[in-house]
Image (cartoon, rainbow, N blue to C red):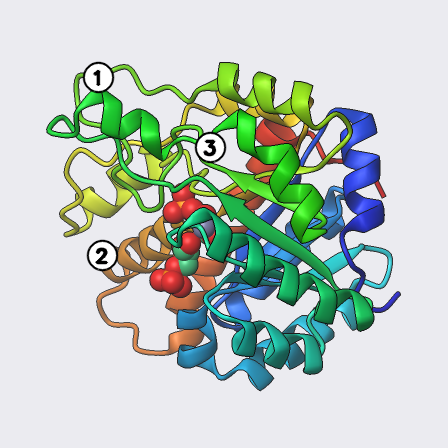
Amino acid sequence: MSLVGTKEMFEKAYNGGYAVGAFNVNNMEIVQGITEAAAELHSPVILQASAGARKYANSIYLVKLVEAAVALHPEVPIALHLDHGADFEVCKDCIDSGFTSVMIDGSSKPYEENVELSAKVAEYAHAHNVVVEAELGTLAGVEDDVSVAAENAQYTDPAQVVDFVKKTGVDSLAIAIGTSHGAYKFKPGTQPHIRLDILEEIVKELPGFPIVLHGSSSVPQEYVKIINANGGGLQDAIGIPEDQLREAAKSAVCKINIDSDLRLGMTAGIRQHFTEHPEHFDPRQYIGDGRKYVKDIVHHKIINVLGSENKI
Ligand code: G3H
Ligand code: 13P
Ligand code: ZN
């Protein structure tokens, strides 16, 4: 099988009550850890590259690494997605160079500008058989000093979603319901929660339409502990509770974005390796341990959060 788009993946996920994991890739070992776990569990998977990843690794390396994973695991449906495309040009570049899905992120722009930009990307992408994700509402951390009104204003407004999807023609919609990027999503002592009630309202407006959740790392404390026990300094790192993501995956959420948890896994493996083997200096030994934890984490997500095992 060659790289696939997400249309069929999302139809099956929507109807099957599960979500497909969209994992950020930055190097070979991350691609390997993710795709080995997906292959073992017979799960579809989305590999996504951010602007930072493309700058770090060079987009050509990333495309070729993902193509290598496809060749090694031909039975696994694998999509290659641009994460947080900032403008038309970056989306066009990825569409022209082999990506099967792109995100145009106009969420920080005024509504009409977001509509215009997302529609322009969708038109070009569809002419090239590529699918498009857009975002409505802005993700942010839940901060104590943000007033409730301002905080609410960041959530996706269910009253806007039908108009947005109709005018843009995009294939999936990323929404803001209280998830946020990074490893520090909630203040210590607060009850971490996402607004599943807003998701429900959006689903009523857009029945059958695939929804995407960004910022969905759960920040597993066992990996935070390994990092801190081996010289790290991550204080009060808190993520999204897994049971809430599982609920969202049973509903219309078809794509769940995870990056920070893989970073924690890679860092935990490498730090632990150096504590246990201070004499080692072969990168294959310590990056190999990082890759092992990346694979373990994706394994865990597929079974406990996404529900996408045996869905090929
Ligand atoms: O949404 C953000 C992803 O975690 C990518 O992060 O831009 O540092 O590669 P990055
Ligand atoms: P996390 O930082 O929660 O892993 O989110 C990643 C993401 O949304 C990538 O687009
Ligand atoms: Zn994101």
The image quadrant where one finds the N terminus is bottom right
Residue at screen point 36% across, 39% down: 180
Viewer-nearest residue: 80 or 138:
138
Distance Cα–Cα, label 3 vs label 2 = 45 Å
To which residue does mark 2 refer? 275
The spot of residue 238 in percent (x, y) is 28, 31
Residue 192 percent location from the top left of the image: 32, 20
- Residue 267: name its quadrant: bottom left
In whole angstroms, how far apart are the C-alphas of marks 1 and 2?
33 Å
The answer to whether residue 72 is left or right of residue 219 is right
Q: From this viewpoint, which residue is outermost toward the left?
A: 145
Q: Nearer the viewer, mark 3 or mark 2?
A: 3
Instruction: Work out whether mark 1 precedes mark 3 in sequence or the reverse, and give the earlier one.
Output: 3
Residue type highlighted by circle 3? Thr
At horizontal 80% and vertical 45% (from top left) the residue drawn is 9
Q: Do the CB atoms of the residues marked 3 and 2 lie less than 8 Å apart?
A: no
Instruction: Pick whichever of labels 3 and 2 is earlier in the sequence.
Output: 3
- Front residue of this view, candidates 212 and 107: 107
- Name the amino acid type tagged 2: Thr
Residue 242 vs residue 290, the one in the foreground: 242
Is residue 293 something that shows in the picture? no
Nearer the viewer's eye, disc 1 or disc 2?
A: 1
Q: Secondary structure at mark 3?
A: loop
**Tag 3: Cα neighbours inside 10 Å, few (<14), some, or many (≥20)?**
many
Task: Report the amino acid beneath label 1.
Answer: Thr
- Identify residue for label 1: 190
| Label disc, if present, on residue 156 of the rendered structure | 3
- Disc ID at residue 91: none
Dot 2 lies on which element? helix
